[in-house]
Image: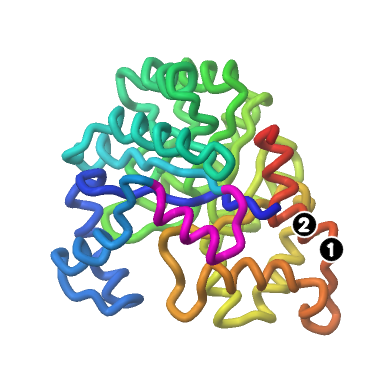
Amino acid sequence: MVIDIHYHLMNKGWDPDKVYLAGMRLFEKVFGASSPERVKEMLSTFWDPSGEKAIQFMDKAGIDKSALLVTDWGFGLGEPEVPIEEQNRYCAQVARQYPDRFIPFAGIDPRRKNAVELLKRCIEDWGMKGLKFHPDVGFFPDDQSFYPFYEKVSEYKIPILSHTGPMFGCLKSKYAQPVYLDGILADFPDIKIIAAHLGFCWWPEVAAIASMKSNLYGCLTGWQLMAQKSYTKFCHTLRAVLDEMGSEWILFGTDGPFDVPNFTARDWVETIKNLPEKCPEGITFTREEVEGILGGNAKRLLNL
């Protein structure tokens, strides 16, 4: 079974304008977009009110299940047209239409005054199975004023998927440094946290913390570019990550519906799947490690 722990459900009016402006230069570099209007036009092709585009993406890639993510940008970047409560409700509704394919994750900024109440609705009323947040919108996740929120997360026994690593534009990278997850891991040992992207360049920090705390995981979302541009470097780095934190704590992710140009989600799945046979000389990956990364580890984490 292949499980994608990191897929974004997107729809019209879900993102504030600052997200389009912040992503403009990045999209210009990667996709050739040249204006905020062009970025909006491109992103509109990913709008997926029914979840059917996500299913098509998964089927083409050979992915069995995906975590559907909602991103709460609004408290930090300006509220979008569609309120975050409605976005979460809608994501849960889409997931209910495809219960064998989707695992809905709520998007909630813990700074919201109604964060605990919204979390309760997401989990108890709408059946969502995890939580996603983006500290880079302007908060340190280990702020103790959020502890009542984390107490509720711990009570529900749901995982947190937190962005870690540098971010573009007006998003503030310092808040997404992995070390700021450590206080939550220490004070709430029953909360399992997934460091999205393994912190990118901060992967040694993720690995070092995870080697000491069994409730920190990492996902390979966003590592496609390294695998595409320098496969040998990717293999060496991944081997170092597995040796430091253990292969059981690494999850697969795509960052869908986005694809790296000339490197599809199918290519990404096959790259991981073929590691035992196609790794560079001097490096080894076992079939057991690969099966865990592609789905076994996520299946265990999510109690599927």
What residue do we see at 20% from left, 40% from top? 80
Report the magenta stretch's main SS.
helix
Q: Is residue 280 above or below residue 210?
A: below
Q: Nearer the viewer, residue 303 or 162?
A: 303
Q: Quadrant of residue 31?
A: bottom left
What residue do we see at 51% from left, 76% from top? 263
Q: Quadrant of residue 213?
A: top right
What residue do we see at 37% from left, 21% from top? 118
| SS label for mark 1 | helix
What residue do we see at 48% from left, 17% from top? 124
> 254 left or right of 234?
left
- Mark 2: few, some, or many residues within 10 Å (few <14, many ≥20)? some
How far from the left and from the top, in percent, is residue 18?
A: 20, 52
Write down the residue under mark 1.
287
| SS label for mark 2 | helix
How far from the left and from the top, in percent, is residue 53?
A: 40, 56
Write down the residue under mark 2.
291
How far from the left and from the top, in percent, is residue 233?
A: 66, 77
**Whether label 2 touches label 1, CB < 8 Å:** yes
> 131 left or right of 240?
left
On residue 192, the disc is none
- State how far apart marks 2 and 1 are (Cα): 6 Å
Q: Quadrant of the C terminus?
A: top right
**Does residue 61 belong to the magenta stretch?**
yes
**Does residue 288 belong to the magenta stretch?**
no
Disc 2 residue type? Glu
Q: Nearer the viewer, residue 157 or 75?
A: 157
> 296 left or right of 15?
right
